[in-house]
Image: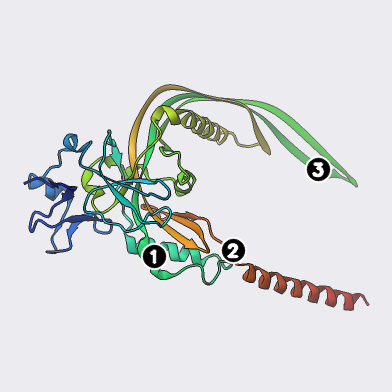
Amino acid sequence: MNKFENDKQGMSLKCPSCGSALVFDPDSQKFNCEVCGSSFTDAELKSKRLEFNEEQAQDDKLKEYRCPSCGAEILTDETTTTKFCSFCGNPVVLQGRLSGEFKPDLIIPFTIGKEKACEILKDYLCKYSYVPSSFFKESNLEKITGIYYPFWEADINSDCFLEADAKKVNTWIVGEKKYTEVKYYKIKRRGKIHFEDISVNALSTADKKLVENVLPYPIKNHIPFNMSYLSGYFAKKNDLSFEDVHGEIKTKLHQYSELLLKNTIDGYDSVTPSISRAKILEENHDYALLPIWILNYKYRKKNYTFAVNGITGKCFGEIPLSKVKLGITFAGISAIAFGIISILGGILL
């Protein structure tokens, strides 16, 4: 018996006890069967000799869902069902087996479950007092979807250099005169720095900004890729190769190295970098899937998409402003200001 059984539709992660579908639960970090109630860790599944043959699953064991409206392409196994697109809210179409190579090196499994993600998102929205009262319906939280996003992650050994202009300002008073002394310094720093997991989104689509705003992820949560953790979730396809994003990785390397070297300079009133360089000595990269909860919400013919980091709970999304609430607040501020001016006017009189 194989861990993933095949049929005409693709594959499903089967329960060793009853043969029904297993789904990964972030809260317990186990694979649960909703039919017989059995629960298994990944180690327990492996001990039952149900290991998944990844090489056989690269091409024809994943399902591809394509949205006819926005064109979003999402990967999953057949245990995941959906009636809407997580990105535009429209129905999705099952395209059949996936062609091409899809084999990540690493994955970070969800540790925040759906219910917890809904609570985090509600708290996030409640912080904004200017959100229209009619904007959010709690029933729409049922549409929140767990999606693994593709990232390129680079480990780099680098030789970094920084030259900066610094100054010290000393001020004192003698009698009625104030004196100021300014000393200028030229400071240089150089060091070999190792950077672990410089992450860049492997998507060029519009949701690139959305998912990058819920970074970072804890490095310790990375594990070797295991197809089992996709059970019950989606996975986005990358459309950028490592070569496509290498320029962005080098930009981040330069920014991080400059910041680190600058932070070694203290005892000055100001420090301004003038020259900085970061030379790559050695580099390795991995293709990783990172967990994000996504909710797409339609309001007054416009789509609003929210993202929740599946590990840290960090949220990001565009929120509409209520003109009525803003008007009431502005009117209240104006009334208070007018009252203060009137009081001051009365005092002056």
- How far apart in space, not on screen, are marks 3 and 1 (Cα)? 62 Å
Foreground mark, 3 or 1, reads: 1
Residue that carries the numbered disc 1 in the rendered image = 141
SS assignment at label 2 = loop
Looking at the picture, tell me which residue is in the foreground, 92 or 311.
Answer: 92
Query: For the residue carrying disc 2, how many other residues have a C-alpha within 10 Å: few (<14), some (14-19), or many (20+)?
Result: some
Look at label 2 and name its amino acid.
Leu
* Sequence-first tag of 3 and 1: 1
**Residue 257 image point, x, y percent:** 51, 31
**Residue 110 image point, x, y percent:** 31, 52
* Sequence-first tag of 2 and 3: 3
Farthest residue, direction left: 1
Looking at the picture, tell me which residue is in the foreground, 255 or 145.
Answer: 145
Look at label 3 and name its amino acid.
Trp
Query: For the residue carrying disc 1, how many other residues have a C-alpha within 10 Å: few (<14), some (14-19), or many (20+)?
Result: many
Q: Which quadrant of the figure has residue 243? A: top left
- Which label number is shown at residue 172? 3
**Residue 127 image point, x, y percent:** 52, 65
Residue that carries the numbered disc 2 in the rendered image = 321
Farthest residue, direction right: 349
SS assignment at label 1 = helix
Q: Compared with residue 267, is residue 43 higher up or lower down, i.e. above or below?
A: below
Q: Compared with residue 307, is residue 247 higher up or lower down, i.e. above or below?
A: above
SS assignment at label 3 = strand
Foreground mark, 2 or 3, reads: 2
Quadrant of the image containing the C terminus: bottom right
- Which label number is shown at residue 94? none
- Rendered residue at 42%/62% (across/down): 120
- Rendered residue at 25%/54% (across/down): 80
- How far apart in space, not on screen, are marks 2 and 3 (Cα)? 50 Å
